[in-house]
Amino acid sequence: MGDFNLALVIVAIVVCVLVFLFNIYLLVNYQHPDDANQAYFPKFVVVLGLSIAAISILMLPADVANRQACRHAIYNGACNFTLPMRDLWLAIYIVDAVLVFFVIPFAMFYYEGDQDKSERWQADKKCLIIGSITTAIVCALVLGILYVRGLTCFMISRVSAELFTTVVFSRKEQLFLPAYSFIVWS
């Protein structure tokens, strides 16, 4: 079982490296020619955001493969050598939330304010910080209000039926069977 988990760890590391390299390739290939050799922080944020998005999607098959390690366990301690998927999921969700609510808005304001390097740069830094803090406060308020007031009551009705019901139709009724089934269905 340890060999399987070692192979899974190696595959996970290789896939993460390939995802980062692919996203760097995408950024270099599709960036605007005027942005070549400048604005490295927003480019890093773009590569990191795309990579986290791809890794969060690719973690589902890794979680399934990790759970399969315990299926054919010969001894009881075999499941102790699996990847800590709960911690990995939590880390991905936290990094995703920090990127969405703090880092990406900061990078956007930074990129917009980085256009001219004059004496206005000090004022632009203040606007950058104010814009980022305002975005974080608005997002925190919206999420907080939705979390606190997000109670929904669903009316649930229980429906039961026999597993198989047999209905006998005559020859003439069989002609109208598609229309009858549509009416009953709707």
Image (tube, rainbow, N blue to C red):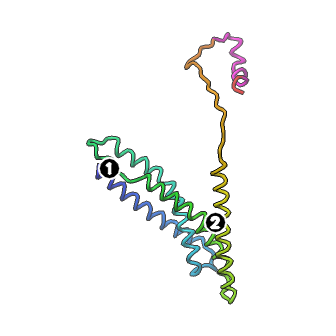
Three-letter residue code for mark 1:
Asn
- Is 130 within the magenta? no
Q: In the rendered image, which residue does mark 1 sit on?
A: 80
The residue located at (64%, 56%) in the rendering is 144
Residue furthest to the front in view is 148
Label 2, label 1: how many angstroms apart (C-alpha)? 39 Å
User: For the residue carrying disc 1, how many other residues have a C-alpha within 10 Å: few (<14), some (14-19), or many (20+)?
Assistant: few
Residue furthest to the left in view is 75
Give the tally of numbered discs. 2
Label 2 SS: helix
The residue located at (44%, 65%) in the rendering is 17
Q: Is residue 72 above or below residue 125?
A: above
Label ID, residue 136: 2
Q: Nearer the viewer, residue 149 or 71?
A: 149
Give the number of the mark in front: 2 or 1. Answer: 2
Residue furthest to the bottom in view is 119
Bounds of the magenta span? 168-183
Which image quadrant for residue 105? bottom right
| Rendering coords of residue 57 (x, y %) | 51, 54
The residue located at (66%, 74%) in the rendering is 109
| Rendering coords of residue 54 (x, y %) | 52, 58
Which image quadrant for residue 114? bottom right
Judged left or right of residue 57, residue 80 is: left
Q: Is residue 133 above or below residue 59?
A: below
